[in-house]
Amino acid sequence: MNNQRIQTSTTNGMPSGIPFIVGNEAAERFSFYGMRAILAVFMTSYLHMTESTSTEWAHTFNSAVYFTPILGAFLADIFIGKYKTILYLSVLYCFGHLVLALNESKEGLFWGLTLISIGAGGIKPCVSAHVGDQFGTNNKHLIEKVFSIFYFAVNFGSLFSTLLIPYLLEHYGPAYAFGLPGILMFVATVIFWSGRNRFVHVPPFGKAYFKTIFSKEALSAIGRLVFIFAFIAIFWSLYDQSASTWVYQSKSAFLNKEIDLFGFIQFTLLPSQIQAANPILVLILIPIFSLYIYPALNKIITLKPLIKILIGMFMCVLAFLVVAYIEKRISNGIETSVWWQFLAYLILTMAEVMVSITALEFSYTQAPNQMKSTVMGIFMFSISLGNILVAVISHYNNLHVEVATIKVGSTTSISLENYTPIKGEKIEFEEGSGLFILQKNIKTGVLDTISLSGTYLVGKVDAPSNSFTLQDNGWNNISTIKRSALPEHYKVVFHRFKHEAYFYMYALLMFVTAILFIGVALKYKGKTYIQGEA
């Protein structure tokens, strides 16, 4: 520990600790995104949770991951510094993966995600700020470049995990699929520890921190940034659905997931593997934007950071309009190519490059030097708010309807009280219906009798009797057997925003937010702070 450097960097080139930070980030992001890539499928296909409940779980977890950064920032800036905070919380992070790998239940899911949210969230603002701390006045011109490299590492790690981990889940089960990310998180921790004597360590500020944070300058900087982060929170409420509602859409049998590249390469994607389009596109788009798009736009308009974010918001609207179009087709039983979803990912990733990378760099440079981690934590909190919004809307979207009768057999017929559904509409069963279906076990491949719970589709509807048949996502009839009587006042769940209306609603929300942000982007005046600079 005596060999740790605390002086500001004086080199003109890239700081010596950057390779260790980038290597750590690549392995840690492999760990996180690999685990997150399979969450939606694991909850719906293995734990038989409804899509609504899974959406609430997934976005509540995401919200926790981006709420705990503010706690990690306080720990780093006031008490033990960024290095120790990252190291200690990374160990906790590893234990979270271990719980997921060993306990394939809702209880295991809860505790595993809780530990990961504390570990992954707690280190987030510290890692980003730790990158910036490696620079001084002589090499501050390299900060923009290194943040792009940093983001490149994020997506380099997530690319391979998003392709590999869903395959492990499909063919080897949850233990292997959750276990490998845990191993990579351990590797990330070792890489970071190995660079301990190469880093510039900015010491914690102790009691002086409180004097700084309540100063007029600090409160002014935080106030300006919080106002901007409130708008960006809406972007995150849309963006993070690529790991939840977009995955549920990709599970539809009417989304053709077969890939044929000019007859030479042919394969079929798993629903959760489609998310790999995002990191692939980020790796491609970062240099394209830096070398070509941004210089070209600068010739038309002064491309300030907030203008980039504004353009990204409008692009996010377009991405959700594409997803709404896909949902309209598959809800009508029209086979649709997965290339349409790739188009949505292309547009969403372009929005991400303009919003996320820009906001990350902007947040660091606009934060007073003694508050770098804290401001990063506040920025992460905007992501938390966006995800909480999705969880709240998902809960509101549920429409509970009481079941009158259920007739079991090769064709299951359901009648309702005071509600007439439409064909193709999603219907969700919570546990405890007393009904069971015969379904192939994902792990063993044999037929099992499984409790009827999860999300299905409304089949043929008989309006006069308010009854309909129950079907899977390929519009095949569901065969059920009865083990016990239907509970009294048992209710199923329908959705207020049906089919494409759900995605149109979010597109409208983002559009209104972007319109309101125009004035902010044009009028904002801030101040830049760099370590070692007066």
Image (spheres, rainbow, N blue to C red):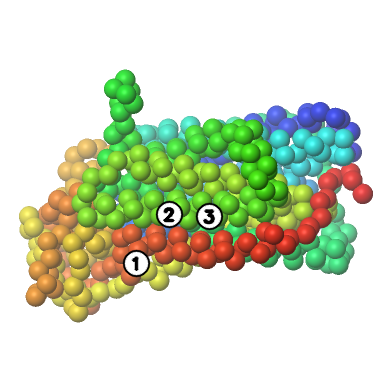
Give the crowd class for mark 3: few <14, some 14-19, many >=20 residues within 10 Å. some
Foreground: disc 3 or disc 2: 3
Residue placed under numbered mark 3 in the picture: 314
Viewer-side label of 1, 3: 3
Q: Position of residue 291 (x, y in %)?
A: 64, 33
Residue in the foreground of this view, choosing between 506 and 386: 506
Circle nearer the N terminus (1, 3): 3
Determine the CA span between mark 2 and mark 1. Answer: 15 Å
Relative to 55, is 265 on the left or the right?
Answer: left
Name the residue nearer the viewer: 178 or 299. Answer: 299
Q: Earlier in the sequence, mark 2 or mark 1?
A: 2
Q: In this image, 230 relative to 496: left or right? A: right
Q: Which residue is mark 1?
A: 497
Do the residues bearing badges 1 and 3 touch, measured as CB atoms within 8 Å? no
Q: Earlier in the sequence, mark 3 or mark 2?
A: 3
Q: Position of residue 319 (x, y in %)?
A: 45, 50
